[in-house]
Amino acid sequence: MAGPGLRRRAVTNQALANLFREIADMLDILGEDPFRALSYARASRAIEGLTEDVAGLVAAGRLSEIPGIGSALADKIREFVETGAVGFHGELRARLPSGLLDLLSIRGLGPKKVRVLWQDLGIADVETLRQAVTSRRLRRLKGFGEKTEANLLRAIELRAEGESRALLWDARAVVARVLDHLRTHSPVERAEAAGSFRRGRETVGDVDILAIAKDRAAVSRAFVSMPGVREVVAAGETKATVLLEYADYVDERPRTVQVDLRILEARSWGAGLQYFTGSKDHNVHLRGIAQSMGLKLNEYGVFRGEEPVAGETEEGVYAALGLPWIPPEMREDEGEIDLAREGALPKPLKGSDVKGDIHVHTDATDGTEPLEAMVDAARRRGYAYVGISDHSVSATVAFGLTADRALARRDPVREINARSPGLTVLLGTECDILDGGAMDYPDEALREFDFVLASVHSKFTLPRKEMTARLVAAVENPHVDVLGHPTTRLIGRRDPIDVDLAEVFAACSRAGTAVEVNGYPNRMDLDGRLAREAKKAGCRLVLDTDSHASAELDAMALAVATARRAWLTPDDIVNAWPLERVREFFG
Ligand code: DGT
Ligand code: CA
Ligand code: CA
Ligand code: ZN
């Protein structure tokens, strides 16, 4: 599992960039010298874009190579590298109410607006802001209006959703930490994660861990004394609950997630795993089936009267109900039980069915590692091919490439392919879909790439009709092979665009354009339900990671979980095919 630890260099630079960004914001909120704020904001961006460790630059006395870093800022950087903090940052922080900076995490609020809210209405945290919005007190302020109020309310709700659930990617890291701790520091005989995590939901409310052990008290003790436990909510012999600290992968903010541990009897392991995996609706349906067979189903087993019929294994529990084992990702009571009874469950996709990843960024645009490093990482995963898809020119925030510069990479790609058999590098592009549905590169350029991934990165608020026409036009372009992250939602941050996906899927199906399941931690776009719709509409799908660093190639596991939630089979998925068939599909 890739965690922040695997990209240490980026973390240190990112932490300093975040700190400078916060200094700039605080200077603006306090209404101090705007030029000073600007220089911190610039420095923050410069540090974020560095490909070298800032600590290394300090050690080598090379700070002056960073553009826009004068001697005052250089002092602050050295202070940060030496002490892990910047005193000036603390001084500013002390001048502001403690919850005020949280307002900046609400979409649509920048430092200037936060200053007005604070100075004119005394709003200093998210809750008071919510109250002010619902009692319509903001619309009287200069620069705010009814529309702003409505947008802010939605942004506050989104943030609350994001705060209350952990990303599946972060939950994976938490589960790995917990299981590893229990296995190395307690006499646990068996331990697995259940709940929404095991079902592969894109976010999880809490993490459910199940265990078997003879010495239960020892396991429970080890659990509540794990590193990172912020609070012990309950500590019993069969059940314990803690709040565990972790850092959100995407914004690196410190967060907590609840973790439940239940210690089961070996004879109930399968029944407990089945019960605590859920979903609740799936379980209710199963209990109905059990009753109709004169059986009782609960977390301890399947019983006829007092007589246990099954419970030790999950397979046994399903078999006792006349069913084959159902993959956890399908357990949402959306028809899977009937299919299972008919023996018609789709064969679930395995991670090893995936033969390549074709949404990968490099440091030529907004990735953090060079082409060679990303290719090596793909090779280590055993892929047959990897598609490089850096941004097109319109994506200026992502350092988009001109068509010439993007196509100039044909030579290094050819060279890598010539000297390394086994893995084939495909040169693609993640080309922006412009407002009207035209592509950011001309057709003459698009036809030169091995594949074209078309994505929306701007103008997210077009009205539904225009947005639908925009996407339909893009997927109908004969050079476009894949529609990237079709809804553009960012979990906890940006709602999906308003678009008639049925119409877009129909167009993809007609045009032979595949649809992406993007596994990037806060995208998960399409989700399982929409990916199933796409399949029903006759579309092929592509499972991608949108990696910006080699450790993020692990996000393929999230795309695979989503594909299983969508009941997809290898034949539906372009990058589960051998290279020759993929090339044919891309034409
Ligand atoms: P989450 O944590 O909100 O992302 O979703 P889950 O599904 O992990 O829900 P959670 O942690 O409350 O419970 C884990 C599983 O335990 C749930 O999926 C099904 C089972 N479960 C919990 N409460 C009930 C219940 O009242 N009835 C039934 N049938 N199952 C339950
Ligand atoms: Ca849960
Ligand atoms: Ca739970
Ligand atoms: Zn993108």
Image: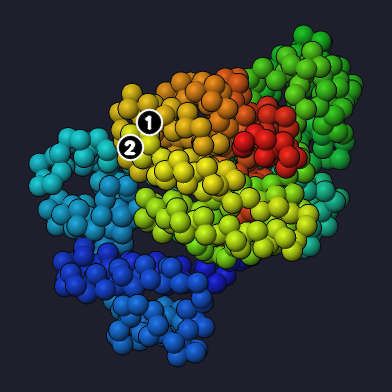
Q: Residue furthest front?
A: 444
Label 2 SS:
loop
Q: Residues within 10 Å of mark 1 (few under 14, many from 20)?
A: many
Residue at point 33% right, 37% down? Answer: 435
| Dot 1 amino acid type | Arg
Residue 78 can be seen in this image:
yes
Pinpoint residue 473: horizontal percent, then vertical percent.
41, 29
Front position in the image: 133 or 232: 133
Pinpoint residue 194: horizontal percent, then vertical percent.
70, 40
| Mark 1 residue CB less than 8 A from any atom of ligand 4 | no
Which numbered marker is on residue 530? none
Residue located beneath label 2 in the image: 435
In the displayed structure, 302 sits above or below 143; it is above
Residue at point 13% right, 46% down? Answer: 143
Q: Quadrant of residue 159?
A: top left
Front position in the image: 183 or 543: 543
Q: Residues within 10 Å of mark 2 (few under 14, many from 20)?
A: some
Residue at point 87% right, 34% down? Answer: 312
* The N terminus: image quadrant: bottom right
Label 1 SS:
helix
| Dot 2 amino acid type | Asp
Task: State left or right for residue 213 relative to residue 18.
Answer: right
Q: Quadrant of residue 582?
A: top right
In the displayed structure, 182 sits above or below 443; it is below
Front position in the image: 66 or 265: 66
Residue located beneath label 1 in the image: 470
Pinpoint residue 199: horizontal percent, then vertical percent.
66, 35
Label 2–label 1 contact, CB within 8 A: yes
- Label 2 vs label 1: CA separation? 7 Å
Task: State left or right for residue 126 relative to residue 120.
Answer: right
Task: State left or right for residue 570 relative to residue 514.
Answer: right
